[in-house]
Amino acid sequence: MNRDFQETLDKYGALLSRVASTYEANHHLQQELLQEITLAVWQALTRFKGESSEKTYIMRVAHNRAVNHVAYHAKQPKSDTYCEVSEPADNGKASAESTLQKEKQIDSLLVAVRKLPIQTRQIVTLSMEGLSYQEISEVNGVKANNVGVILNRARKTLMEQIQHVE
């Protein structure tokens, strides 16, 4: 692995992992998707021309790969083995009760986000990663003012779903 790519992974690895977890609930398929995204980023970096920020470019590649992954797996026969949800991380810094509550909230949010249509899911995920409306527009091909409309609708939907679960 060349040094530039390793630096890119060091810088954006956690972000790519979060993208994978947004699209895939099953831990093993998350890891598979993360590998697919990493390979896609590695291949795409040679074509990066600086027309956007590196982060925006990498997010576009990651989301395109994730959409392809979801589309492929949606066509596959369903099996009980693909129903497991990833194990929550244990950081040992908070009490067990507060950690469990926080993990439950995160799991509820991820389940709700995964139920959104693909384009809305992409926009929500990019927003959660701190990208501006303009950057989200560049990644997703939606006009920047439409990004705000989609995000507002998605927030309302997510709030309703999360409140319904609680």
Image (cartoon, rainbow, N blue to C red):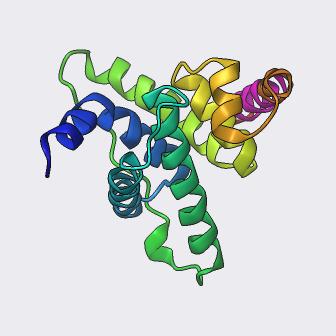
Q: Which residue is rendered at x = 39% and y = 41% of the image?
A: 16
Quarter of the image with the C terminus is top right
- Determine which quarter of the picture holds residue 121: top right
Q: Indicate the position of residue 38 as horizontal and vertical percent values.
A: 34, 52
Q: Indicate the position of residue 9 as horizontal and vertical percent values.
A: 26, 39
User: Taking 140 as reference, is 111 left or right?
Assistant: left
Q: Residue furthest bottom?
A: 77
Please, is residue 6 above or below residue 163 in the view?
below
Q: Which residue is rendered at x = 51% and y = 25% of the image?
A: 129
Q: Nearer the viewer, residue 2 or 159?
A: 2
Q: Indicate the position of residue 51 as horizontal and vertical percent values.
A: 55, 31
- Determine which quarter of the picture holds residue 126: top right
Q: Which of 31 and 134 is in front in this view?
A: 134
Is 64 covered by the magenta stretch?
A: no
Please, is residue 143 above or below residue 81 in the view?
above
Magenta stretch, residue numbers: 152-163
Dominant secondary structure (helix, strand or loop) of the stretch shown in magenta: helix
